[in-house]
Image (cartoon, rainbow, N blue to C red):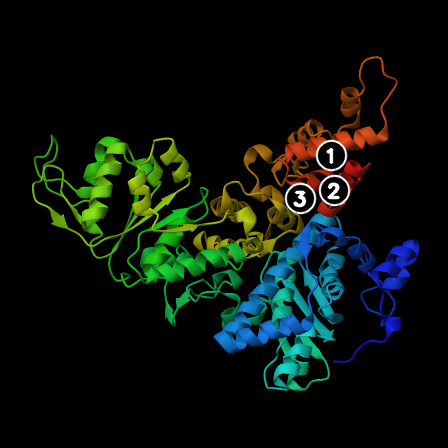
Amino acid sequence: MSTPPSASRVSLAEMSRAGGSSGALMRRGEPSPLDHTDHPRLADLTECLFFSPGDGRIWLNDQRMVLMHTSSLGTLRRELIDSVGLERARGLLTRAGYESGARDAQLVRQRWPDADARASFMAGPRLHALEGVVKVEPVEFEFDVTRGTYHGEFLWHHSSEDDEHIKAYGLGTEPACWTQLGYAMGYVTGMLGLPVIFREVECRSTGAAVCRVIGKTADAWGDVSEDLRYLNAKEFLSARAFGPAQPAVLGGVQLAAAASGAGEGGHDMVGVSSAFKSACHMLSRVATTRATVLFTGESGVGKELFASMLHRISPRKAEPFIALNCAAIPDTLMESELFGVERGAYTGAATSRPGRFERADGGTLFLDEIGSLSPTGQGKLLRALQEGEIERVGGTQAIKVDVRVVAATNVDLQAEVKAGRFREDLYFRLAVFPIHLPPLRERREDIPLLMNFFLHRYSRLHGRSVRGYTPRAVKALLNYAFPGNVRELQNIVERGVISADDDGVVDLPHLLRREQLDEGLYSLGAAGVLAAAAEAGQESTTSGAAPGLLLDRLCEPGQAGVSLQAVEHRLIDEAVEKAQGNLSAAARLLGLTRAQLAYRLKARREA
């Protein structure tokens, strides 16, 4: 690995002393073909990088960063390969790169929301260079967000991954820029709103003079099954998100069956984010056991989907999967629904019938919204779990059942226990292996994949031919807070597919409810809430963004005026209060980075 001459380096101290000439310093060294494109330029991106040496933190916008020796990363790479094998190590590093690229895409979207689309795409290579990973030289690059097309060819110079791989293993026969490929896929997918797959066709690790990569949409590549081996953390995750023709496959066997509705993607799980992968790893670990599982998380995160997949990858997959929504059954009928009824047990019980426990014998019983179960129902469920046997209503004979119980709740059961509304002993029985499912706002890297997945799913279901999304629809969906989580995204996209013209694209008005369809009267607020413009304006006013109202509130009667510093302090205080102390959220409300807000707060304390 060659060391660059000192004349091509720029120190942080030089940058600080240079002031206005920092742009020239940033161009010192080899010229980049990206330097003369529109904003955000490399100099713009450097303004997002903040060093706080006194407290040991570095920030890229509101994301914390670290400086590490590439040799340390090389050691980690070797340890991974030696410990888990080359294939699994490649998958881990590819997915880590994907998440990094997706986060950088989110940074660019939020920091430069009105930037030219081409410049936004090119900001990814600039960030990769700024982060010290690789220098990118575009060879060919074209895209059309509306048509959902992308084609890019790039040369990678000075790849840090290649340096370490060659140092450890020498030249080989396979490309080695795994993290960089994942980054490229995560970044471009996050900007386009459709899955884009990059392949390294030449690599320094195979003896080439320079690395060459080509990126295209999954549809354009055709078969991307080889690529998905490294992007999907588990083989039970669906490939449908990456293209309309990809089936859900587990161990070489297609899982979906037309008779069950899965042919339309009803049981497919889609995601690459770290929060989603963590839940999938836990699911895979507990699936082969008999343990009771409790899924927790907000409404709409996919708890029943996870429960169904738990059953499908377990040894009980050939036996029944029975689901019951506890909130949908009246208390008077809950016992008969769970345990069955003997003939003549009560008026109207003309025949004997089995309950959900008997129907699920040998398989899995899923109890959704378990927190709504009445105290009486809780006691009887606890006995069934403890004894492994039930009695039908009106019956006298105990019936042995072999059932794996899986429960789900969108309320905090521990808080319910403390409040006396849920039995503590039942909670411990259910929460043998709890799995928390993250809300969609905590797995934003998955939104483009879900957008593509639902677009193809509902185009097939409703017999429509919809080509993609408009740029403003992509921007709105990627920045929306989704209080209803995946279920809300699913419904929004289905509405868009139905509303869009055949052979057309989904635009923002197609996604909104009818009461929001007045052209020009919709906006995406600073907090990520899609609302009518009047509501967005009201939100800005109440948050202290209206200068006239703010001045009226700051100026006490009889005072001549107020200082600019006082206005700034008041704005910051209100933003922090509104964000409940979350500096990242407060910074977004003020149009600042987290580091900029932290600097102002620190300077104010020291003044």
Q: What amino acid type should be assigned to the residue bearing mark 3?
A: Ser
* Residue at x 80%, y 60% (from the top left corner): 42
Determine whether 308 is above or below 513 in the image. below
Q: Taking 457 as reference, is 526 left or right?
A: right
* Residue at x 68%, y 39% (from the top left corner): 586
Q: Earlier in the sequence, mark 1 or mark 2?
A: 1
Q: CA distance from mark 1 to mark 2?
A: 8 Å
Q: What amino acid type should be assigned to the residue bearing mark 2?
A: Leu
Q: Taking 498 as reference, is 153 left or right?
A: right
Identify the residue position indicated by label 2 in the image.
Answer: 597
- Secondary structure category for the residue under label 2: helix
Q: Nearer the viewer, residue 250 or 435?
A: 435
Determine which quarter of the picture holds residue 167. Answer: bottom right
Q: CA distance from mark 2 to mark 3?
A: 8 Å
Determine which quarter of the picture holds residue 250. Answer: bottom left
Which quadrant holds the C terminus? top right
* Residue at x 66%, y 48% (from the top left corner): 472
Q: Taking 212 as reference, is 312 left or right?
A: left
Determine which quarter of the picture holds residue 428. Answer: top left
Identify the residue position indicated by label 1 in the image.
Answer: 572
> Do the residues under discs 1 and 3 have CB atoms within 8 angstroms?
no
Q: Which mark is residue 584?
A: 3
Q: Position of residue 422 (x, y in %)?
A: 33, 35
Q: Position of residue 298 (x, y in %)?
A: 46, 42
Q: Is residue 214 visible?
A: no
Which quadrant holds the N terminus? bottom right
Crowd class of label 2 (few under 14; some 14 to 19; many from 20; radius 10 Å): many
